[in-house]
Image (spheres, grey):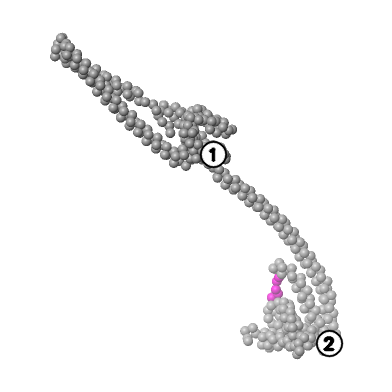
Amino acid sequence: MINDTSKPDKARFLIHLKVFIAAVAAIGAYESFMQWIFGDHPLWQSHLITIVVGALASVVTSFYVYQKSQQREQAMLAVTRQSNSFNKFLVDAIPVAVFYKDQEGRYLGCNRLFSEIMGVSEAEIFGKTVYELWPSDLAKIYHQKDLELIANPQIQQYEFQVKDKSGQLLDVIYGKSIFCDINGQAAGIIGTFFDISEKKRVESELAQYRKHLESLVEEKTAALERSNRALLVAKNTAEAANLAKNLFLANISHEIRTPMNGVIGMTDVLLNTRLTDEQRKMAQVIRDSAQTQLGILNDILDFSKIEAGKLDLAIEPFALADMVAKTCAALAAQARPMGVTLRQAVDARLPPAVVGDALRVRQILSNFLSNAIKFSSGLERAGDVEVIVRQADEE
């Protein structure tokens, strides 16, 4: 620690001066008293007594002054020792390395942590410079920083490196300032450093991890962009295919609808000629089937509307019994060769007309009946398919 070794010479001189003045005053008072008693005829006894009294007074005074001086010095030494001990324990308890130097850069002391890191004791570094203890390129920078601090006394903080007792370079943060003597003049430097090697290592790992994450994000972003481009190509291809399909359906439906309209027209002409009842019945079946087929062609054109959610249903009155009879008549010719009997039973209490889309109802019924005929054929016994139409609220 830093000790003040100056002696209180001025105070001691003042004490001796006071004692001397007191002794002179006492002897002068005594001589005056004797002169007053014996008049102008001093006696040798008077002088002898004066000498003896003065000598005794000097001896007593000197002893008293010596005792007081010793007591004062002991008290000051005890206070100094206690202060130094307190400061030493305080500095050793600080969890950073602490050191202090004089103005020339010679070490005056350090704390326990400094000794542990650098591998030197306080006694080994006392009075030595950094060049003598750790000669290297770093020593020159250490000393230059100390000179800058002495020239410009203010708190100095910076990151640098130190080489520990094993020769390993440690990243540290320095914090330094000056300390002053009793006259307020710069007497030296006190400094600390804190090991941040672990902090630097973690920062480096975090930077590498962040760089890795950024690389992954870039890769995923590039892959996502490629996927989006592929999806866009697939979407465009699908839209083109859908457009081509719609164009095909429109064209093929038009090509089929034209001759189908001719079949329906010629059937109507045929029905206006002389026909037997059997011939008229078959011609009517041909006309109804052609109309159903024409409705299916119209449905094909509606596929594009279904995909767009814009399919409209016709809401208009139609004769349900007549529609069922015509549908069964059209499919009866299909059922007979397959050994299936197709019958219908329509409740007479049904209203003559219901409201709905007759074309869609006939299409649904045709699909049901076609499947029923298909799965009722090829059996050991004859198949039988029956269509029953009645009120929905009746069992």
**Front tag of 1 and 2:** 1
Answer above or below: position of 200 versus 183.
below
In the image, which disc is placed on residue 165?
A: 1
User: Is residue 133 left or right of 381 when viewed as pictured?
Assistant: left
Residue 198 image point, x, y percent: 55, 45
Q: What stretch is highlighted in magenta?
A: 311-315
Residue 28 image point, x, y percent: 21, 16
For the N terminus, the image quarter is top left
Q: What element carries label 1?
A: loop
User: Is residue 43 left or right of 201 when viewed as pictured?
Assistant: left
User: Is residue 91 left or right of 291 when viewed as pictured?
Assistant: left
Magenta span has 312? yes
Going by the numbered disc 1, the residue's amino acid type is: Lys
Q: Quadrant of residue 131?
A: top right
In the image, which disc is placed on residue 391?
A: none
- Residue bearing the label numbered 2: 279
**Pick the front one: 137 or 393:** 137
Magenta span has 316? no
Residue plotted at (70% across, 73% down): 313
